[in-house]
Image: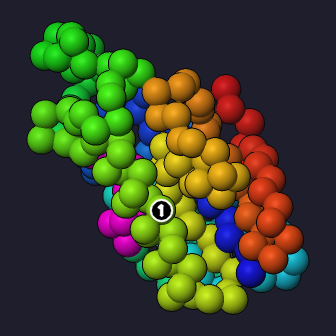
Amino acid sequence: MKVFLLRHADDPHEIIGGWSDIGLTGLGKKQAAEIANYFTTHEKEMGIKHIISSDLKRAQDSVLPTSQALKLEMITNEGWRGLDWGELNGCSSETAKKLYPYLNLQMMQEDESFPKGESPKGFYQRAVDTWQKTLKQYDGENLLICTHGINMMALEAYLTGKKWQYNVQRTFYPCVLMEIDLQKHIIQARMLYPYT
């Protein structure tokens, strides 16, 4: 069984995405088309049986062209959402700094959360639970899952047996694909679209 974890395409950088339903930028829409091209070109070798996406617009819009090209239904699941930033979801970075100048993900304790949001510890547990439930539900079938960068960071730590350090700067750029071969215990990451 292989799982292809895809970080959604480019979204507005000046907005805190979180659980907001922002869409893709013009570049992100172009990337979504390129993602579809990549997966149709490699369709036989990848053998994807199901496409799963975070239920947020930017993730769905990233794999909708792939879903259509491969003629596979896109299954949405809110468990694949990124960290819930609470009151900061959808805020501009500038507004967030004015409203909450003391809040900083790199400075937070793992059980702290943003106002009306989710703690890094709670998020990590949700990400791992969603991963485990998904593998159980689709046992043995190759999957394409479109999610968010922070989910990929958490699962990379979980799958490699490392402590997830949410407060360490690690970036999964738009369109990074993480291929996870569960039989061989191999994890590989690559860019599907050059980040500029």
Residue 73, given in percent of the width and then of the height, sits at: 50, 84
- Which amino acid type is shown beneath numbered disc 1? Val
Residue holding disc 1: 128
Residue in view at x 23 percent, y 36 percent? 113
Residue situated in front as seen by the camera: 116 or 125: 125
Image height check: is 58 above or below 10? below
Residue 61 falls left or right of residue 43: left
User: Is residue 156 in view from this perspective?
Assistant: no
Range covered by the magenta-colored residues: 77-84
Quarter of the image for residue 38 reads bottom right
Disc 1 packing (10 Å; few <14; some 14–19; many ≥20)? some
Residue in view at x 80 percent, y 66 percent? 185
Residue situated in front as seen by the camera: 176 or 169: 169
User: Element under label 1?
Assistant: helix
Residue in view at x 35 percent, y 36 percent? 110
Quadrant where the N terminus is found in the figure: bottom right
Quarter of the image for residue 172 reads top right
